[in-house]
Image (cartoon, rainbow, N blue to C red):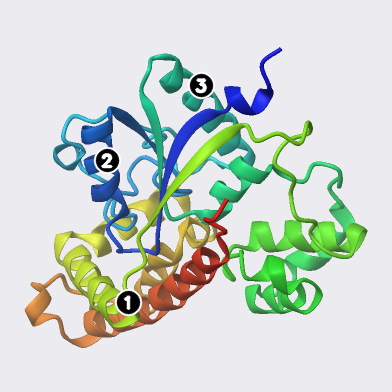
């Protein structure tokens, strides 16, 4: 009998913080190595969230097939469990066609869910959820951090759904347990990593340049449209670009679209607020990358 480890599917994972160049590097690898790309991004699954998510364009794809982009309406939920199910199916299909599955993106929780599995032995607690829903995102994150620092560093402090789920598991288990790869102890995949992790100063410059470009290309109008479609509560769940811009739209009417070199007034304040929040997010992404053990 062939050992199961010899049947593990080869995959390539391209990871890095926001604005680091993951998408273009994944395309380059796919062209050279005969691959197809699976997006590991919790927001690019949604149709119409293009500028705020820096969604890759058809021209930038350069003919390489991309999967898990534009597959959901923004009013619908898409969970880590949905991603694992979809990615598992796609990896098998791509590999069966003798192509290399390339997973690229910045939602590191999805990488964890796919490669380590999801905890499934803690049932929902409606009473606890109702209590936690009354807390602010900052209070929820503080509770997770106090109880389980390891899990806290993996979470977006503004993602209320995941924070509440973590506290639900902590209530039962004490901590969110590290997830085992597979029930049989053998790896399902042979994983090669490409980690793009620019120096901090270089990354901050890239983040600021990307944000200025996004505003010039119509980010504010995109957020207006999405807000009208889904409402403020859902908008806040679609990531910090949409949440922060939505906050400005609710309090300011003087958000003008200008060339990057001419941003001023409230629009300049928006850019600065987004830059600060994205840099905080990028630092958490960098912390996750430092935890990767690439020696295995």
Which mark is first along the chain, 3 or 2? 2
Q: Nearer the viewer, residue 239 or 286?
A: 286
Image check: 41 left or right of 201? right
Picture disc at residue 92: 3
Residue 11 seen: yes
Disc 2 from disc 3: Cα separation = 19 Å
- Looking at the picture, how far across and down is residue 21, in whole percent? 27, 57
Quarter of the image for residue 224 reads bottom left
Q: Nearer the viewer, residue 104 or 46?
A: 104
Tell me the SS state at disc 3. helix
Q: Residues within 10 Å of mark 3 (few under 14, many from 20)?
A: few
Quarter of the image for residue 183 reads top right
Which mark is first along the chain, 1 or 2? 2
Q: Residue at x 86, y 61 (%)?
A: 128
Callouts 3 and 1 close, C-beta under 8 Å: no
Which residue is denoted by mark 1 in the rendering? Answer: 199
Residue 86 seen: no
Callouts 2 and 1 close, C-beta under 8 Å: no
Image height of 249 relative to 116, above or below: below
Picture disc at residue 29: 2
Mark whose residue sits in front, 2 or 3: 2
Q: Nearer the viewer, residue 176 or 51?
A: 176
Q: Residues within 10 Å of mark 2 (few under 14, many from 20)?
A: some
Image check: 209 left or right of 107? left
Q: Residue at x 89, y 65 (%)?
A: 174
């Amino acid at each position: 009998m062939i050992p199961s480890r010899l049947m593990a599917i080869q995959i390539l994972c391209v990871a890095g913080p926001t604005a680091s160049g993951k998408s273009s590097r994944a395309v380059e690898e796919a062209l050279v190595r005969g691959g197809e790309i699976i997006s590991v991004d919790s927001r690019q699954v949604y149709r119409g969230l293009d500028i705020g998510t820096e969604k890759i364009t058809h021209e930038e794809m350069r003919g390489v097939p991309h999967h898990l982009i534009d597959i959901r309406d923004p009013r619908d939920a898409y969970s880590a469990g949905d991603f694992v199910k979809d990615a598992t199916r796609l990896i098998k299909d791509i590999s069966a066609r003798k192509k290399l599955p390339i997973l690229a993106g910045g939602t590191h929780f999805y990488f964890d869910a796919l490669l380590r599995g999801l905890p499934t032995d803690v049932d929902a607690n409606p009473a606890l959820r109702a209590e936690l829903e009354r807390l602010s995102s900052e209070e929820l994150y503080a509770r997770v951090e106090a109880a389980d620092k390891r899990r806290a560093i993996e979470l977006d402090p503004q993602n209320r759904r995941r924070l509440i789920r973590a506290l639900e598991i902590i209530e039962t288990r004490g901590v969110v347990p590290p997830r085992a790869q597979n029930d049989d102890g053998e790896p399902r995949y042979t994983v090669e990593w490409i980690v793009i992790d620019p120096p901090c100063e270089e990354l901050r410059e890239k983040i600021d340049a990307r944000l200025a470009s996004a505003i010039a290309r119509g980010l504010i109008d995109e957020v207006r449209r999405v807000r009208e479609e889904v409402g403020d509560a859902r908008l806040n769940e679609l990531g910090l670009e949409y949440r922060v811009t939505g906050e400005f739209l609710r309090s300011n009417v003087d958000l003008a679209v200008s060339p990057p070199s001419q941003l001023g007034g409230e629009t300049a304040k928006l850019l600065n607020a987004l830059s600060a929040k994205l840099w905080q997010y990028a630092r958490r992404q960098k912390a996750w990358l430092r935890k990767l053990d690439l020696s295995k």
